[in-house]
Image (tube, rainbow, N blue to C red):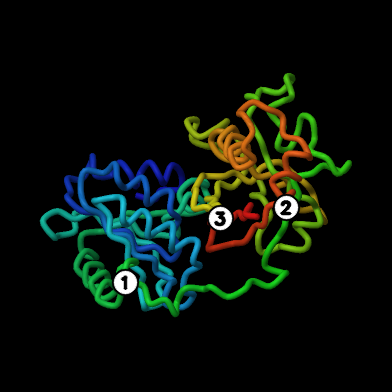
């Protein structure tokens, strides 16, 4: 059986079909939000970050994963010292594999929530033995995130061409009245007062093509619980400078040289999560319009965006 849609639902409900007492996830890249959801499973889980061996890990992502490790009882997070790009999801019972999925989907919001872009396929029983040996080899060459060799943490000062500063101001050098951070203030929109988004300008996309990829060529359906159907927007994970994590969405359309790119980013599935978060940082009441003087008093009118790994971003609003 081959799966191309609802991959997150498949991963988190597969144990209801195949009786198991352990889940092992091997993924080239990982994100904190799916790992956090593992706390709801009724058994122990192992998550292995495969590309640590060749790419190391950014401190923001490591700190987020370490926080999950220290606060969730049924997870163990490992970093593979071997560079592994494979994606394997393996369910075990009494130490033996009872079911496994392999394919291209990373264990991240981006990898599991974008229909038709990634695939997972069921393996046959004859593959269980070599797959088990493969996982044992990787685990033998992995270290727990709590014993990380600090040399592998990427703490270098980022170059200017690696940080995109997304402005929170409109063209008139003020916060827009009913768009951007004040998107929800427009009474004609189907929004709540705290809904917000951050604008991605054409120049941002041209200057930082590694951050903002082209959109999918044709609309696809999405899980109705996660948003309207027939979207072709990318789900991402956002780690803020203060450690707060949220799911995000790159949405809207801007055409550059005949190619569609996203022109906004917000929290997902509720745009109000971003609006509430920014208002909390600015120390103004929820529902209150955000003005230029609020940003001036805070000390910053932009957000620095960097890519931590595939589909996982750091947003810096520190002062």
Q: Position of residue 160 (x, y in %)?
A: 72, 69
Image-based side of 215 in relation to 69, left or right: right
- CA gap, disc 2 to disc 1? 35 Å
Q: The residue tagged with tag 3: helix, strand or loop?
A: loop
Q: Which mark is residue 166?
A: 2
Q: Would you name the residue on which mark 1 appears?
A: 147
Q: Position of residue 92 (x, y in %)?
A: 19, 55
Image-based side of 121 in relation to 280, left or right: left
- CA gap, disc 3 to disc 2? 15 Å
**Cβ–Cβ under 8 Å for marks 3 and 2:** no
Q: Outermost residue, right direction?
A: 172
235, 267: nearer the viewer = 267
Question: Which residue occupies 34% across, 47% down?
Answer: 11
Residue 60 vertical position relative to residue 244 in the rendered view, above or below = below
Mark 3 or 2, nearer chain start: 2
Image-based side of 269 in relation to 291, left or right: left
Q: In which image quadrant can residue 253 be found?
A: top right
Q: Would you name the residue on which mark 3 appears?
A: 241
Q: In which image quadrant can residue 15 be found?
A: top left
- CA gap, disc 3 to disc 1? 23 Å
Look at discs 3 and 2 and give the one toward the viewer: 3
For disc 1, the neighbor class at 10 Å (few under 14, some 14 to 19, many from 20) is few
Q: Is residue 80 visible?
A: yes
């Amino acid at each position: 059986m081959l799966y191309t849609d609802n991959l997150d639902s498949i991963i988190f409900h597969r144990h209801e079909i195949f009786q198991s007492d352990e889940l092992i996830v091997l993924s080239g890249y990982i994100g904190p939000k799916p790992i956090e959801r593992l706390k709801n499973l009724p058994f122990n889980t192992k998550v292995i970050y495969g590309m640590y061996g060749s790419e190391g890990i950014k401190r923001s992502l490591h700190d987020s994963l370490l926080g999950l490790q220290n606060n969730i009882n049924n997870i163990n997070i490992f970093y593979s010292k071997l560079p592994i790009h494979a994606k394997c999801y393996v369910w075990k019972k009494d130490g033996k594999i009872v079911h496994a999925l392999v394919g291209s989907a990373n264990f991240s919001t981006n990898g599991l929530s974008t229909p038709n872009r990634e695939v997972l396929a069921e393996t046959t029983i004859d593959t269980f033995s070599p797959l088990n040996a493969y996982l044992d080899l990787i685990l033998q060459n992995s270290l727990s995130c709590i014993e990380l060799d600090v040399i592998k943490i990427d703490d270098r000062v980022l170059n200017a061409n690696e940080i995109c500063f997304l402005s929170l101001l409109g063209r008139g050098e003020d916060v827009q009245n009913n768009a951007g951070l004040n998107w929800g203030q427009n009474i004609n929109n189907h929004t709540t007062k705290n809904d917000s988004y951050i604008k991605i300008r054409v120049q941002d996309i041209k200057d930082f093509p590694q951050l903002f990829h082209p959109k999918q060529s044709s609309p696809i359906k999405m899980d109705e619980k996660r948003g309207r159907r027939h979207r072709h927007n990318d789900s991402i994970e956002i780690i803020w400078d203060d450690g707060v994590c949220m799911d995000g969405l790159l949405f809207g359309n801007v055409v550059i040289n005949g190619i569609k790119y996203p022109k906004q980013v917000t929290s997902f599935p509720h745009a109000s999560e971003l609006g509430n978060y920014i208002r909390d940082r600015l120390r103004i009441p929820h529902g209150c319009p955000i003005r230029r003087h609020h940003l001036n008093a805070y000390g910053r009118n932009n957000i620095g965006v960097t890519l931590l790994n595939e589909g996982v971003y750091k947003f810096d609003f520190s002062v």
